[in-house]
């Protein structure tokens, strides 16, 4: 990443657009700079939160703090956009909320970011506005979650957030994002976008399970097989993304867990958290990044580039992930 | 088929009926044999199957095997009760394979007493996104059975016409299709196309608009009261029955009771908390709604944990 900021600043900020128009472009996506950088980003954050609780005290930069405030403001819009009543999935009140998001987001980003980053706002705004669901289809899924993670990656690439923020990015910012998304899902009854239901992990999210399984360790408070048992996770769900996600599923779903969440039920049989975490990384590629129905909506611009990784060497494209304490 | 093989087949069907009662999917070779039997039956059926009342019509099921048993307890079992199922047998629920197997075995046993129409989920593309493909991979360890099922989906009838006046179809109307005769000449033996009349019949939704509007689903149309009444008049229909959309109360009449949505998957996606409905026609004009709820947890069998490939 040493040169990425310079590279990015030489070209004007642009509104990011989808580029994976048909399935034949999936190979180009997997060979792209964006794919490589995003994969390294997810793994780097995965290592950063190893063994940590959401409530742990970690370095929190002023920018990250302001981004959390931005999410709080988006949350407050919900009260101004009440649900309108529905007959099936998706409450039309969500369109009001999303309209307000689009109307206010650029200004909110200006308020949150120091002026030197304001050149990038148009590009950042594309990812932010795509992070909370689709206002036409009234749905939300892992593709929107991916947009938020790309938003965080963009902030790192322009160095508005730095390596020092990596733990707080997951434990504080992403965790706040997930809370907001859950509130949106429940308030407006958003349809799970492209959901395989129990054949994937969850109707809406993936990353809380991925990063969340890194937070949990074999010498920690809970074993994988206890993670779906309310008696064990009840008091831990605020501190661990994985357990919070299981708790949320049990709040919104009824019927037997082994039916509505059969994959989570099956993998509770995995003996060690480290094994489970490795599986999550593989599954994230297999079920999210490498799936055309999701990839077709990914936005690309100057920061998240669809250009191929230069060959033969891929060195120096991305800042080497920081060595993490406790490893 | 000679008499001997026919009686063998009957023996197989009876064996499968016993097997599926316990929510057990069939061994691969048996399921392939079942698919072959059903293919032959579908092949003989029209795009728009003529049906005579009394008949009970059902909406989306989405792999909720235990709730389908409740449906039969509510509506009666074939052959005593005649059924039309309006598609979306698979995806979303945990037991798509068992649900489909149950319906196919009934169809094999009493082909004239149960009509299975195609829904938008009976398609290669949709089942790869919404779970049925993954379910087949998990339960059979390969995609062969999924391919067999998709081949079968291609052969499913598109609609049914009760007593010449009640049209049953999964989604709704199409601006490209003005008459039932036009439905009869669709080349149905194919993957559901991305646009055009066949696609619309599988994907469209009624809405409180005058004519037509773009559908937020990205396929099919929203259609209003005017095209509906025009279509009904042109085809001398008294009612259009369709499924495709969750209804919290299980059943919803629209357009001055000329169109009805029937939804038969209670507590859809394990989260919606809705009631399910089926609609029993004593005659074409005399019908009765029957409601049912999701089967409680304690009446479902807990499967053993299996290993998911990513976590090996």
Image: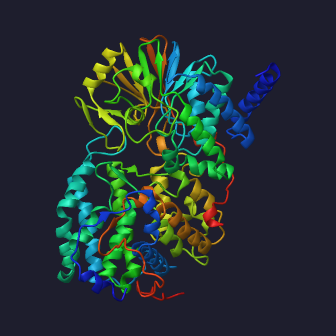
Q: Is residue B280 left or right of residue B98?
A: left
How far from the left and from the top, in percent, is residue A132?
32, 59
Q: Is residue B300 left or right of residue A98?
A: right
Residue B50, given in percent of the width and then of the height, sits at 50, 16
- Which quadrant of the figure contains the N terminus of chain A? bottom left
Residue A306 at least partly seen = yes
| Residue B256 appears anywhere in the view | no
Residue extending furthest toward the right: B4
Q: From the top left corner, tell me how far across and down residue A36 is, in percent.
A: 45, 76
Q: Quadrant of the C terminus of chain A?
A: bottom right
Rendered location of residue A136, percent (x, y): 29, 49
Q: Is residue A199 above or below residue A30?
A: above
Horizontally, residue A110 falls left or right of residue B245, namely left
* Above or below A46: residue B177: above
- Label tally: 0
Asked if A291 appears above or below B253 in the picture, the reply is: below
At 24% from the left and 29% from the top, the residue drawn is B211
């Amino acid at each position: 990443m040493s040169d990425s900021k310079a590279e990015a600043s030489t070209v004007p900020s642009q509104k990011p657009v989808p580029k994976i128009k048909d399935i034949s472009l999936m190979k180009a996506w997997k060979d792209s700079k964006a794919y490589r950088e995003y994969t390294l980003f997810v793994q780097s954050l995965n290592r950063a939160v190893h063994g940590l609780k959401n409530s742990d005290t970690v370095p929190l930069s002023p920018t990250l703090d302001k981004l959390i405030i931005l999410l709080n403001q988006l949350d407050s819009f919900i009260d101004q956009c009440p649900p309108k009543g529905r007959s099936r999935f998706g409450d039309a009140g969500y369109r009001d909320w999303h309209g307000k998001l689009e109307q206010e987001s650029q200004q909110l980003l200006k308020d949150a970011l120091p002026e030197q980053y304001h050149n990038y706002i148009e590009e950042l705004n594309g990812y932010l506005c795509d992070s909370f669901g689709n206002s036409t289809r009234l749905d939300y899924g892992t593709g929107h979650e991916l947009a938020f993670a790309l938003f965080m990656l963009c902030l790192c690439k322009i160095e508005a957030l730095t390596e020092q923020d990596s733990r707080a990015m997951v434990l504080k910012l992403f965790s706040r994002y997930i809370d907001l998304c859950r509130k949106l899902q429940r308030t407006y009854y958003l349809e799970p976008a492209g959901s395989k239901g129990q054949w994937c992990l969850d109707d809406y999210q993936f990353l809380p399970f991925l990063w969340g399984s890194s937070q949990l360790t074999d010498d920690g408070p809970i074993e994988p097989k206890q993670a779906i048992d309310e008696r064990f996770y009840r008091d831990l769900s605020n501190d661990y993304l994985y357990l919070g996600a299981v708790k949320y599923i049990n709040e919104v779903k009824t019927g037997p867990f082994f039916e509505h969440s059969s994959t989570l039920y099956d993998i509770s049989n995995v003996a060690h958290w480290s094994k489970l975490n490795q599986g999550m990384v593989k599954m994230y590629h297999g079920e999210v990044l490498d799936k055309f129905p999701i990839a077709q909506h990914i936005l690309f611009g100057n920061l998240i580039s669809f250009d191929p990784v230069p060959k033969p060497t891929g060195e120096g494209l991305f800042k080497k992930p920081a060595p993490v304490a406790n490893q | 088929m000679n008499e001997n093989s026919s009686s063998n087949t009957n023996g197989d069907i009876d064996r499968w009926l016993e097997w599926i009662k316990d929510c057990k999917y069939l061994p691969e070779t048996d399921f392939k044999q079942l698919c072959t039997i059903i293919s032959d039956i579908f092949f003989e059926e029209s795009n728009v199957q003529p049906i005579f009342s009394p008949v009970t019509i059902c909406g989306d099921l989405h792999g909720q095997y235990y709730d389908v048993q409740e449906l039969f307890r509510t509506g009666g079992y074939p052959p005593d009760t005649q059924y039309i199922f309006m598609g979306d047998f698979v995806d979303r629920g945990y037991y798509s394979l068992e649900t489909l197997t149950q319906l196919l075995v009934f169809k094999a046993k009493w082909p004239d007493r149960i009509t299975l129409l195609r829904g938008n989920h009976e398609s290669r593309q949709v089942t790869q996104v919404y779970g049925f493909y993954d379910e087949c991979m998990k339960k059979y360890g390969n995609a062969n059975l999924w391919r067999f099922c998709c081949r079968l989906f291609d052969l499913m009838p598109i609609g049914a016409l009760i007593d010449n006046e009640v049209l049953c179809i999964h989604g709704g109307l199409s601006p490209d299709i003005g008459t039932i005769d036009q439905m009869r000449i669709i080349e149905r033996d194919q993957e559901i196309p991305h646009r055009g009349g066949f696609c619309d019949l599988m994907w469209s939704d009624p809405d409180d608009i005058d004519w037509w509007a773009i559908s937020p689903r990205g396929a099919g149309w929203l259609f209003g009261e005017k095209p509906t009444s025009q279509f009904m008049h042109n085809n001398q229909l008294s009612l259009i029955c369709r499924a495709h959309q969750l209804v919290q109360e299980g059943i919803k009449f629209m357009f001055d009771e000329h169109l009805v949505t029937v939804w038969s998957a209670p507590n859809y996606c394990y989260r919606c908390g809705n009631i399910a409905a089926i609609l029993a026609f004593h005659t074409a004009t005399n019908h009765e709604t029957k409601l049912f709820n999701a089967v409680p947890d304690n009446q479902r069998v807990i499967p053993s944990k299996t290993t998911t490939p990513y976590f090996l």
